[in-house]
Amino acid sequence: MVSGGSAALTALCVAAYAALLATAAVSLYGVLGRRNVIKKIIALTILGDTVNTIAILAGYRLSPHAAPPVLPTLTPSKAVLARFASTAVDPIPQALVLTAIVINLAVTAFLTFLAIQAFRLYGTLDYAKILRLRRGGSGG
Amino acid sequence: MGSGRHAYVVLAAAAFAAAMAGILAWVFGPPATYGRVRPLGEFILYSTFDLFRKAFWAGSPEAVTATVWDYRGLDTVFETTVLYAAIAGCAALAYVEVRGGFKGVGAGVTAAGGEGLTVVVKAASKILFALILITSLNIALHGYITPGGGFAGGSTFAVAPLVLLAAYSLNALVRAGLTLPRSSVLRSLGLVVLAAVVLAPLAYYGFALQNQPKPGSGFPGYPVFAGPLFLGGSLLYLNLSEFLVVGMEFVMVFTLFTLLDKAFESVRGSGGGGGVG
């Protein structure tokens, strides 16, 4: 039911998903497993970008004739509109990712401020050491 | 202790990967949906510039910007709120450190004079600054007919102060007029314009965030065609105000980072070990 070209496209897409899932798993390990707060933040940004890429890929039209979601004319006929709707990729994931990138940037800046503050107070970026210093300092 | 913790982390990562794979298998069944997108996406693609059925159109041939500010505009408004909260959090955290600097960024820093890198780097970064400014404005201004928009233009503009900060110092940014209070005021101005464009239809018994005329609403819609000009409804104004908001918020963040660094250096220099005890 699927021709040779479409099978190759599907295989390519599945391979891209597999690579993105592997990246997501590794970056999740970075967020949970690393002790250095800055490394946690770096892993978090990689995780965010990976999820954004997955969203974009989920909205891709698996076809050799996939077009960008921008209508190339200001005087479209009904046939042009129908062709546009049946060839352009899904605009919704792109719209969500567009804003998500900026939010990611702002949240990363906020987390970095927190990390700087933690380093100023405790002299270390090691999560376990910060916890130990906190317990020792406040007496429980 | 180490191996047990790592086993837990690996297990969590594997569970996450499995969950993601499950979601993807549901969202995306390759042979069944080959060459198609989801029905909602197809509806937006068809109706975004559907001149023959204007009840559902957004007045813009750019389906992504139409989705951002018209079809799913409420999402974007709340995302702007998240952005605002994150930057407000940064400012609140930094305020503890640079209490004095907030008032005196202009005067105190400029008096110290301009340091920075070599003449070559300075000249190149000046040209780059102008180019980035023009490019980002272009991205924001044309966001309703070509790929781009307020978010993309704003984050492109965010690189410009970074170039100045790296090649010169905070002084250059202050001398260019981008002080912390001024960028904060410009950011608020962008938010006010955005809110005004979003709420204006309510005055005509329309809906908040309404762009084009809709059944059951008295609002005539923002102009799409004005003589030879193509204006694209409310998307143009929303893109420009969002450009101001995003760009100025990142100028604030980079200024705060630099000030925090300075405050931190002075604390380390005089106080020694800080609060570690």
Image (tube, coloured by chain):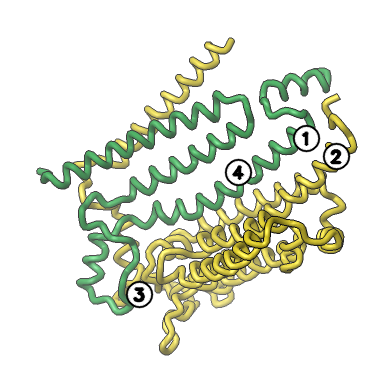
Chain colours: A green, B yellow
Could you give the CA–CA distance between mark 2 and mark 3, rounded to whole angstroms? 62 Å
Quarter that holds the N terminus of chain A:
top left
Q: Is residue B13 depicted above or below B137 in this figure?
A: above
Residue B114 in the image: x percent, y percent? 78, 61
Q: Is residue B173 depicted above or below A5 in this figure?
A: below
Mark 3 or mark 4, whichever is nearer to me: 4
Q: Residue at x 46, y 68 (%)?
A: B143
Please state which amino acid type lies under the numbered disc 4: Thr
Mark 4 or mark 2, whichever is nearer to me: 2
User: Residue A44, located in which quarter of the rendered image?
Assistant: top right
Could you give the CA–CA distance between mark 2 and mark 1, rounded to whole angstroms? 9 Å
Mark 3, residue position: B54
Could you give the CA–CA distance between mark 3 and mark 1, rounded to whole angstroms? 58 Å
Report if the CB atoms under discs 4 and 1 are less than 8 Å apart: no
Front one among B59 and B132: B132
Labels 4 and 2 within one chain: no
Q: Residues within 10 Å of mark 2 (few under 14, many from 20)?
A: some
